[in-house]
Image: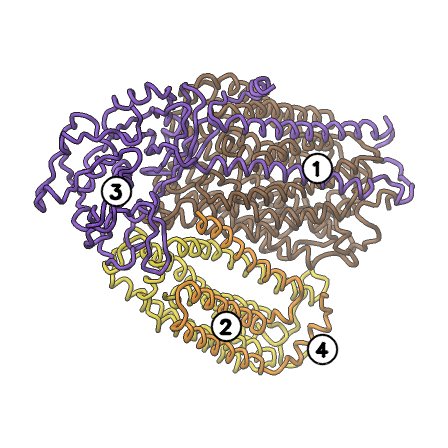
Chain colours: A purple, B yellow, C brown, D orange
């Protein structure tokens, strides 16, 4: 039944876990729509034929002298039941539809995050393992994946018909979308929001790989493209580091070069700006008396517009990095702060028990470097293994 | 209809109206529909103010400090008094006191001009500090998007209101000329009543703009 | 009583007329030209999409074609047509009034429409616009094309729409004939009244949002500009606050025509007058609460998606009430199957199917897959072409004798109507399937496996175009050579048929005395 | 309750005393002073809500007295009310989105 209806309505294959339940609602809604429309048309045709005027009489039909009330029409009860039924039908559509919508929009907690950047007429992706790709999104089949998306110029819309999923990609904001591919396969990505002459060529592909060789493919990727020199902030990068750094380590490097450590410490010691130790997901008091959870969105926003939600007790001296840092760099710094979340905020106390999945023992940049001297690449010895990956 | 001697000729009833009452109701009703559409022209901007105030609450509260409170407050008093004088003009025209009507209208227009002068002074202060709308915003003491959006919205709303103020001045001026020439009289006060309605709308919009842009400091 | 057509002659008498009937005809010519221009753009789009790769248009030109099709069709034809042509001509006559409340304002509204249309067409000619008729920022602010001029032109056309709406509301309130009570007015008047309310309330918000886009595009005063911290989704809020009620501006007058056509040709009073009258007002007011269903995936909060979803379901009930009442009106009638009735039958299927797919699209989870694909394109064409265009053609045929004093050829009428309806179905049903298959809208090139559906749609489009050309042909022929029409060829009890054919300048010899209801078919015709 | 012609002429012959205009002016000026005073006392969002409610009261006074809504027909009053309702409606719809994002 499902296959027949899917082929009849020309729906693409149901490649994500949500696609099948969405399609069931689709069949229910479309069938009732067809029945309703055909029914009304048939009834109209029947009445037209049944009550047509006698053939051939003059153009001016004789007056119908029957008294007013005997003129047909239906009882009030019949009318109320029809509209009550219709209203109930529409409300059921809404109840099922909206509950599915909420499930579509709430990513499961353990989903892997991938950063997506829409740019005029191409899609680029940055993976938590530091790799990056343009035009192809590698995802592990059978595991939920959360996409944090932003745009560099105009509104695009990330649309994967096979997953029945679409979300606008708005510049200046991060919107999110999650899915879980059922089994390995390749699926088309379209841009669904008018974004210029190349709108119809802004296509990409989701490649769902089995878990085993997903790691291998990811490792082989070139480092996330820090596309082009960042305007105004000449970041002296080595041509290409011997092997891809993890996103957190890259975040540490970008933060160092962007000069974040002039005001922010990573081991809890108080300084000009709030320390990054234990900052991730902590509720912090703001200047205007309210509180906010320092999650990805807050950290990204405060990099773009620091004065908007100022941490109480600190001066509004931080410059805005809007346009200075690209989205992968921002993602990298946020990931680095995420990893620092486990470092204890109060120096001297016993460090927290090592977290379960063995996060990377990061070198504190303030230790080995004299102020102002550019930091060398990460030490070879403690090569960071990708966080959260089970070899 | 009894003629009221020097009140001028009774008004002509147009062909499509059955009587004078319907014609006058049509005039007032049509004017109110026009005022409704003018108010909804501002609705878009009020919506934007709500949205950006929710998103940049602290920046908006802080940016209000830069607006000169004394100019805003004087302007609100000016407009309330001008609303009174224009209403008084309508009232005295109905009692057929042409001189008081003309004086009230003159004071109204003077107050309107005064409002625009103060508005000009305030814009001058902003321009001197580098507070410009949109991309041209270059105000050092309040960097950041919140303040930039606040002042862009400030220019859009007060600018649109100033345009409506100029329109109101033109309308009152035209009506004052008709009263002076005796074409708008006690028997046919419709044009002055409609001009007054438009003026009251412009005043009501400023009564809302004042707290939004001058008062709500945190 | 000499007819309004021949009372005064000469170009000046037509261009400076204050007669609501002549202004109606002027609008008819202007909007018919807009329809043809929009149709040309539509055919260019359809022929470009015959093959997956680029054909005779490059990417930018193709984007300009569908944008021009959208802007010309929506703002210059669909929104103004039935109120300004048939509303202008018949509203005063149905109220028993000699003219609208403000005749000079009525003429001003026509010239403001022409000015706005001229500005829009100038923008299309010099540089064109490629942002889609929705002008979404930030692309509309950064597009190299002449967006600012086009946005200003649409603002001016909006002013004309406000003036017309204002004029009609005052006319209904103050110019009803002696003892014509509110619940005895013809249903077409109710539909035009509800449309006028939406025009007056919603159009200013569109004017403001388009002015903000024009300022952003011209001088960088962007309030929605993300690089300045602005939020492009807010533009969508302001735009759709107008544009969803705008679709009710398009469909409500068409529903008014349906009520008149059904009652006249089934020779029966509406089965429930109050249901149709009050659901017109219901659609007008509840229509303002549902704009968010255009933005379910635009990054809106989940709370808003839920609220706008349930409200969108409510507004569909009023349309359902109307459709149900029309169907029952046919019962116990004596139906004469003329061209307007064939259009009515087409309307019933197309509008109901289009409307139900609308409610389907408002189901939030399905919308995630459907929005911005050809499914939505097919949905709104089913309502716009299947609903408003069919009723525009039905109204032309229904009131042709009263407006021009001549009869149209019935046989050719039926052929034209069949061509239009079949051509339409053949064009847009494949697009529903394209949408399901996931082809996004506004695509210049597309993956090859969508090609056969596009070819079918293009074939249908040619049939639709032929049907419209045939209709235009025999109507022009009938204008001059059609047989003379008598005062009331359809035996209708509407008040407009009490006036002689074609009506004199002030519609009735003596002020109308209302002695019976507008649908009293059980009384012999006076 | 459309007014008959005689009512219209009667109203024009002997309009009420100008007292209500003066009273309205004083009320408006007092409310302005009140808003100005409160502005130093209240903090943040509460201050905004208080100021806007007082502004709404002032606009109602202007509407009823100066714009003579009290004496106009039902239709005119409905137009005024509907216009204000739709302004509030737009702001609520937008707030429901930005506030809960």
Determine whether label 1 and label 3 are within 8 Å by CB. Answer: no
Answer with left or right where residue A330 lies relative to residue C406.
left
Q: CA distance from mark 2 to mark 3?
A: 76 Å
Relative height, residue A35 to residue A1 (above, below): below
In this view, the mark in front (1 or 3): 3
Relative height, residue C369 to residue D5 (above, below): above
Judge the density around disc 2: few (<14), some (14-19), many (≥20) Cα neighbours within 10 Å. some
Secondary structure at numbered mark 3: helix
Q: CA distance from mark 1 to mark 4?
A: 48 Å
Answer with left or right where residue A131 lies relative to residue C289.
left
Answer with left or right where residue C454 lies relative to residue C418.
left
Q: In terms of image quadrants, where is residue C55?
A: top left
Q: Are marks 1 and 3 on the same chain?
A: no
Residue C367 percent across, percent down from the top left: 52, 34
Secondary structure at numbered mark 1: helix
Check disc 3 and report the residue beneath it: A340
Residue C336 percent across, percent down from the top left: 80, 31
Front-most of C308 and C492? C308
Q: CA distance from mark 4 to mark 2?
A: 26 Å
Q: Which comes sooner in the sequence, label 4 or label 2?
A: 4
Determine whether label 2 and label 3 are within 8 Å by CB. Answer: no
Secondary structure at numbered mark 4: loop
Check disc 1 and report the residue beneath it: C400
Chain of the residue that carries numbered disc 3 in the rendered image: A
Q: In terms of image quadrants, where is residue B93?
A: bottom right
Check disc 2 and report the residue beneath it: B177
Chain of the residue that carries numbered disc 1 in the rendered image: C
Answer with left or right where residue A39 lies relative to residue D22.
right
Secondary structure at numbered mark 2: helix
Judge the density around disc 3: few (<14), some (14-19), many (≥20) Cα neighbours within 10 Å. many
């Amino acid at each position: 039944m499902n296959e027949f209806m899917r082929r009849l309505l020309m729906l693409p294959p149901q490649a994500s876990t949500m696609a099948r339940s969405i399609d069931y609602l689709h069949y229910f809604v479309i069938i009732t729509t067809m029945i309703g429309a055909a029914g009304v048309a048939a009834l109209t045709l029947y009445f037209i034929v049944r009550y047509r005027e006698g053939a051939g009489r003059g153009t001016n039909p004789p007056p119908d002298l029957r008294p007013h009330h005997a003129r047909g029409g239906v009882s009030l009860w019949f009318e109320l039941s029809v509209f009550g039924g219709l209203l109930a039908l529409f409300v059921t559509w809404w109840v099922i539809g909206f509950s599915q919508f909420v499930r579509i929009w709430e990513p499961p907690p353990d989903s892997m995050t991938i950063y997506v950047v829409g740019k005029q007429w191409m899609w680029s992706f940055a993976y938590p393992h530091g790799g990056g790709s343009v035009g192809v999104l590698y995802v592990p089949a059978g595991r939920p994946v959360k996409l944090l998306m932003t745009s560099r110029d105009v509104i695009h819309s990330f649309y994967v018909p096979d997953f029945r999923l679409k979300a606008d990609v708005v510049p200046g904001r991060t919107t999110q979308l999650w899915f879980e591919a059922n089994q390995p396969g390749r699926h088309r990505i379209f841009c669904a929001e008018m974004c210029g002459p190349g709108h119809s060529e802004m296509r990409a592909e989701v490649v769902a790989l089995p878990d085993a060789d997903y790691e291998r493919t990811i490792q082989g990727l070139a480092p996330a493209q820090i596309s082009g020199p960042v305007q105004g902030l000449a970041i002296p990068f080595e041509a290409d580091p011997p092997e891809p750094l993890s996103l957190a380590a890259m975040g540490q490097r970008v933060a160092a070069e962007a000069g974040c450590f002039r005001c922010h410490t990573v081991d809890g010691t108080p300084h000009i700006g709030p320390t990054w130790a234990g900052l991730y997901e902590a509720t912090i008091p703001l200047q205007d008396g309210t509180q906010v959870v320092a999650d990805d969105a807050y950290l990204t926003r405060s990099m773009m517009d620091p004065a908007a939600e100022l941490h109480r007790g600190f001066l509004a001296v931080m410059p805005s990095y809007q346009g200075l840092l690209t989205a992968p760099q921002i993602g990298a710094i946020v990931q680095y702060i995420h990893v620092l979340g486990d470092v204890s905020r109060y120096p001297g106390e016993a460090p927290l028990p090592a977290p379960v999945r063995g996060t990377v023992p990061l070198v504190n940049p303030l230790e080995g470097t004299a102020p102002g001297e550019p930091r060398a690449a990460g030490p070879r010895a403690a090569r960071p293994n990708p966080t959260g990956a089970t070899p | 209809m009894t003629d009221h001697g020097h009140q001028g000729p009774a008004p002509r009833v147009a062909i499509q109206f059955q009587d004078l009452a319907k014609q006058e109701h049509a005039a007032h009703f049509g004017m109110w529909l026009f005022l409704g559409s003018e108010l909804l022209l501002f609705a878009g901007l009020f919506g934007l103010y709500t949205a950006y105030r929710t998103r940049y609450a602290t920046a908006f509260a802080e940016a209000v400090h830069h607006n000169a409170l004394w100019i805003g407050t004087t302007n609100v008093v000016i407009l309330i008094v001008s609303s009174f004088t224009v209403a008084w003009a309508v009232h005295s025209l109905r009692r057929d006191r042409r001189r008081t009507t003309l004086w009230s209208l003159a004071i109204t227009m003077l107050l309107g001009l005064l409002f625009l002068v103060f508005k000009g002074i305030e814009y001058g202060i902003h321009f001197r500090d580098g507070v410009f709308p949109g991309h041209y915003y270059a105000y050092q003491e309040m960097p950041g998007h919140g303040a930039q959006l606040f002042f862009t919205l400030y220019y859009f709303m007060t600018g649109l209101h100033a345009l409506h103020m100029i329109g109101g001045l033109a309308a009152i001026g035209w009506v004052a000329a008709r009263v002076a020439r005796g074409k708008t009289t006690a028997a046919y006060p419709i044009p002055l009543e409609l001009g007054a309605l438009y003026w009251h709308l412009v005043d009501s919009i400023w009564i809302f703009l004042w707290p939004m842009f001058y008062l709500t400091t945190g | 009583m000499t007819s309004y057509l021949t009372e005064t002659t000469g170009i000046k008498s037509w261009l400076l007329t204050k007669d609501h009937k002549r202004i109606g005809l002027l609008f008819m010519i202007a909007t018919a030209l807009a329809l043809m221009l929009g149709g040309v753009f539509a055919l260019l789009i359809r022929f470009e999409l015959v093959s997956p790769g680029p054909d005779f248009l490059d990417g930018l030109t193709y984007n300009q074609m569908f944008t021009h099709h959208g802007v010309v069709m929506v703002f210059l034809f669909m929104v103004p047509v039935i109120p300004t042509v048939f509303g202008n001509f018949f509203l005063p006559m149905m109220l028993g009034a000699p003219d609208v409340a403000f005749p000079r304002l009525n003429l001003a509204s026509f010239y403001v429409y022409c000015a706005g249309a001229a500005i829009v067409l100038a923008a299309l000619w010099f540089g064109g616009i490629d942002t889609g008729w929705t002008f979404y920022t930030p692309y509309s602010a950064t597009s190299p094309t002449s967006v600012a001029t086009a946005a200003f032109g649409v603002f001016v056309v909006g002013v004309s729409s406000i003036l017309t709406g204002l004029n009609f509301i005052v006319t209904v309130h103050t110019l009803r004939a002696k003892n014509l009570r509110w619940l005895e007015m013809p249903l077409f008047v109710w539909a035009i009244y509800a449309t006028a309310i939406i025009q007056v309330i919603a159009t200013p918000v569109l004017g403001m949002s388009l002015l903000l886009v024009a300022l952003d595009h011209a001088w960088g005063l962007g309030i929605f500009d993300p690089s300045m911290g602005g939020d492009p989704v807010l533009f969508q809020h302001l735009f759709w606050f107008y544009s969803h009620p705008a679709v009710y501006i398009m469909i409500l007058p068409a529903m008014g025509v349906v009520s008149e056509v059904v009652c006249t040709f089934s020779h029966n009073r509406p089965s429930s007058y109050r249901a149709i009258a009050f659901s017109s007002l219901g659609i007008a007011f509840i229509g303002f609460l549902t704009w968010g269903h255009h933005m379910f995936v635009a990054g809106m909060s989940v709370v808003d998606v839920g609220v706008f979803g349930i409200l969108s379901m409510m507004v569909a009930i009023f349309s359902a009430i109307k459709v149900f009442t029309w169907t029952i009106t046919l019962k116990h009638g004596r139906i004469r199957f003329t061209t307007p009735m064939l259009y009515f039958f087409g309307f019933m299927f197309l509008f109901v199917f289009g409307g139900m797919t609308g409610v389907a699209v408002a189901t939030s989870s399905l919308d995630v897959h459907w929005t911005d694909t050809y499914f939505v394109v097919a949905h709104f064409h089913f309502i716009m072409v299947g609903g408003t265009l069919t009723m525009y053609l039905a109204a032309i045929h229904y009131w042709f004798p009263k407006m021009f004093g001549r009869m149209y050829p019935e046989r050719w009428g039926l052929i034209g109507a069949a061509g239009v309806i079949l051509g339409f179905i053949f064009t847009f049903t494949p697009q529903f399937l394209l949408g399901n298959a996931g082809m996004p809208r506004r695509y210049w090139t597309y993956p090859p496996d969508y090609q056969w559906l596009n070819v079918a749609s293009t074939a249908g489009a040619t049939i639709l175009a032929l049907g419209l050309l045939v209709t235009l042909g025999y109507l022009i022929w009938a204008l001059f050579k059609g047989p003379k029409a008598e005062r009331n060829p359809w035996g209708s009890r509407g008040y407009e048929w009490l006036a002689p054919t074609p009506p004199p300048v002030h519609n009735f010899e003596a002020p109308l005395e209302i002695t019976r209801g507008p649908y009293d078919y059980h009384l012999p015709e006076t | 309750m459309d007014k008959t012609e005689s009512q219209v002429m009667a109203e024009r012959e002997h309009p009420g005393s100008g007292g209500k205009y003066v009273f309205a002016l004083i009320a408006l000026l007092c409310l302005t002073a009140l808003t100005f005073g409160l502005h130093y006392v209240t903090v943040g969002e509460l201050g905004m809500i208080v100021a806007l409610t007082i502004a709404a009261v002032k606009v109602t006074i202007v509407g009823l007295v100066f714009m003579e809504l009290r004496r106009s027909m039902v239709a005119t009053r409905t137009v005024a009310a509907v216009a204000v309702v739709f302004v509030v409606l737009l702001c609520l719809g937008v707030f429901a989105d930005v506030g809960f994002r």
